[in-house]
């Protein structure tokens, strides 16, 4: 039996919808053959796959990061504007193959407008220059009569796009990154870029390139740049064939958030920074099976539980995590997969869908009291070096809650990690009571496909029902291996 106490009056923080963000990279079939498929009967006149757009729209993507990822570190944006047939083909250093440049800045920003999401562009700090980065910002946001602003108008977009989010390079610490830098080199270079970009566009929201949250790289970058940027980025990938490792490893993100936050708070105090940066988890996902140039990972339901847990973690920490980008959206380590004829979903699609649909304006404090599970020992089961053995024990049921600004609506998201056992729970509200019918949606593994699921992977069953609680407590039973969302009206002081 697990007791979940929710106190709507104890605010964790405002939930930024950008924690339901995504990421699309020029990698495998993510862009070409994924979101963009020129000449397909499934695409609109611009080449945007309508079926993919439909599935992504349901996820209410709060922000979309592009064009990479590792790809960006030899991407030259000016190759991707103007008449498509005149655009040069270039070698792709990160993933191999060639880039046609037929999908570029104008296409990406039109896609964001169509999806109703905020664009977030990552700058090339590998082979790119500061001059080129400034030209990109000017091209997107210049309101005057400057050359780049006029060039944009000439390409059919008179009004500035108003791109606010700009990333200062991608994983510049990595040996796999074109133009890899040491932390000191990065701080020197990225500081020059940050200052110049803010001079050109004071509204630019800048993201420094962090690593995992606890590394020396993070420490040096935060110490050197916390006064210049608005967000510090972290990346995390987890995953394992071992069930417990797979479903518990996302808790490493909580350690990462604590560590990055401590580094930021220290820098803010020592350096007297009035508005220190918050965290952008601008790549996160389960990913451990594929490592070729396509990353066409096939997901199962335990991956879906891990994804649900990641989102619980971002909600619980939303005072510090202001953005999080599921890496990626289509075909490459993605919830949506395409063929020439259709677009279908993988199990990880559904926790994102349910979370984004239910989340309300403010995260509220949750206390979970019930059975716990010991951490998987080692980390030897995983491709990734995330040891969580020292983090547990973990509650069997992972929970997060949000409330509306007026506290009249409540949403609780619950992951039951027990593989075979149902878990009886009781949700107890403090100071308020349930007001009428409560909606309950539960995801469980299901081998029969719902018609839009990928035929060769484990399917998902979504059951929706209602409960009629009395007073401040709601009792129900979570199915084994499940993700459940409870949405309710409340009344009280
Ligand atoms: O998302 C796949 C890759 O993972 C990205 O290109 C890179 O930033 C990270 O290493």
Image (cartoon, rainbow, N blue to C red):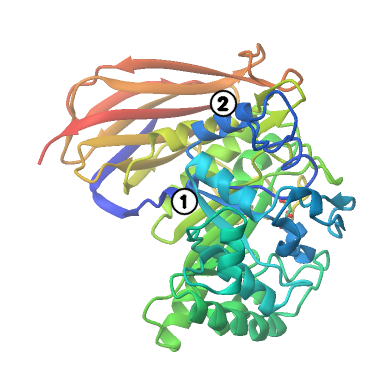
Q: Residues within 10 Å of mark 2 (few under 14, many from 20)?
A: many
Residue located at (72% from left, 64% from top) = 78
Task: Name the N-terminal-most of marks 2 and 1.
Answer: 1
The front one of 470 and 135 is 135
Q: Residues within 10 Å of mark 1 (few under 14, many from 20)?
A: many
The front one of 35 and 86 is 86
Horizontal and vertical percent position of residue 73: 76, 65
Judge whether 143 appears above or below 358 on screen: below
Residue with the mark numbered 1: 18
- The label number, if any, that marks residue 481 in the structure image: 2
* Mark 2 residue CB less than 8 A from any atom of ligand 1: no
User: In this rendering, would 178 be left or right of 48?
Assistant: right
Horizontal and vertical percent position of residue 233: 58, 64
For the residue labelled by badge 1, is the local secondary structure a helix, a strand or a loop? helix
Residue 90 in view of the camera: yes
Q: Point out the image quarter for the N terminus.
A: top left
* Mark 1 residue CB less than 8 A from any atom of ligand 1: no
Judge whether 133 appears above or below 49 on screen: below
The front one of 114 and 322 is 114
Residue located at (43% from left, 75% from top) = 276
Q: Alpha-carbon distance for marks 2 and 1?
A: 28 Å
Residue located at (59% from left, 22% from top) = 420
Horizontal and vertical percent position of residue 341: 74, 20
User: In this rendering, would 467 be left or right of 389?
Assistant: left
Horizontal and vertical percent position of residue 88: 83, 57
Residue located at (28% from left, 36% from top) = 410
């Amino acid at each position: 039996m697990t007791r979940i106490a929710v106190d709507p009056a104890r605010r964790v923080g405002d939930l930024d919808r950008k924690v339901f963000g995504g990421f699309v990279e020029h990698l495998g079939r993510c862009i070409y053959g994924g979101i963009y498929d020129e000449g397909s009967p499934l695409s609109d006149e611009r080449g945007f796959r309508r079926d993919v757009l439909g599935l992504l729209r349901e996820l209410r993507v709060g922000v979309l990061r592009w064009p990479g990822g590792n790809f960006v570190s030899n991407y030259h944006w000016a190759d991707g504007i103007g008449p498509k047939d005149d655009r040069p083909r270039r070698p792709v250093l990160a993933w191999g193959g060639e880039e046609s440049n037929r999908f570029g800045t104008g296409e990406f920003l039109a896609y964001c407008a169509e999806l109703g999401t905020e664009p977030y562009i990552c700058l090339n700090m590998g082979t790119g220059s500061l001059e080129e980065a400034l030209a990109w910002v000017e091209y997107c946001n210049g309101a005057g009569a400057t050359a780049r602003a006029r060039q944009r108008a000439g390409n059919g977009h008179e009004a500035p796009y108003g791109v606010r989010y700009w990333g200062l390079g991608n994983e510049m610490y990595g040996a796999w990154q074109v133009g890899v830098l040491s932390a000191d080199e990065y701080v020197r270079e990225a500081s020059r870029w940050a200052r110049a970009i803010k001079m050109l566009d004071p509204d630019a929201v800048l993201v420094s390139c962090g690593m995992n949250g606890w590394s020396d790289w993070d420490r040096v970058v935060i110490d050197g740049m916390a006064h210049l940027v608005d967000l510090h980025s972290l990346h995390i990938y987890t995953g394992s064939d071992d069930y417990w490792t797979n479903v518990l490893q996302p808790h490493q993100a909580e350690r990462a958030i604590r560590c990055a936050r401590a580094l930021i708070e220290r820098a803010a105090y020592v350096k007297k920074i009035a508005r220190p940066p918050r965290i952008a988890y601008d790549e996160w996902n389960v990913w451990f099976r594929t490592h070729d140039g396509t990353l066409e990972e096939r997901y199962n339901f335990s991956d879906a539980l891990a994804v649900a847990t990641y989102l619980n973690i971002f909600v619980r920490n939303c005072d510090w995590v202001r953005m999080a980008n599921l890496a990626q959206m289509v075909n490459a380590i993605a919830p949506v997969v395409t063929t020439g004829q259709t677009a279908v979903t993988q199990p990880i699609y559904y926790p994102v869908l349910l979370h984004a649909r239910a989340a309300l304006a403010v995260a509220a404090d949750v206390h979970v009291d019930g059975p716990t599970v010991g951490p998987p020992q080692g980390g030897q089961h995983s491709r990734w070096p995330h040891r969580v053995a020292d983090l547990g024990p973990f509650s069997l049921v992972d929970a997060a809650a949000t409330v509306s600004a007026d506290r009249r609506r409540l949403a609780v998201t619950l992951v039951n990690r027990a593989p075979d056992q149902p878990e009886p729970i009781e949700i107890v509200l403090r100071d308020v009571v349930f007001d009428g019918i409560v909606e309950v949606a539960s995801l469980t593994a299901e081998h029969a496909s719902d018609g839009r699921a990928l035929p060769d992977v484990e399917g998902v069953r979504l059951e929706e029902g209602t409960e009629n609680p009395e007073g401040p407590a709601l009792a129900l039973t979570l199915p084994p291996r499940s993700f459940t969302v409870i949405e309710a009206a409340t009344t009280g002081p």
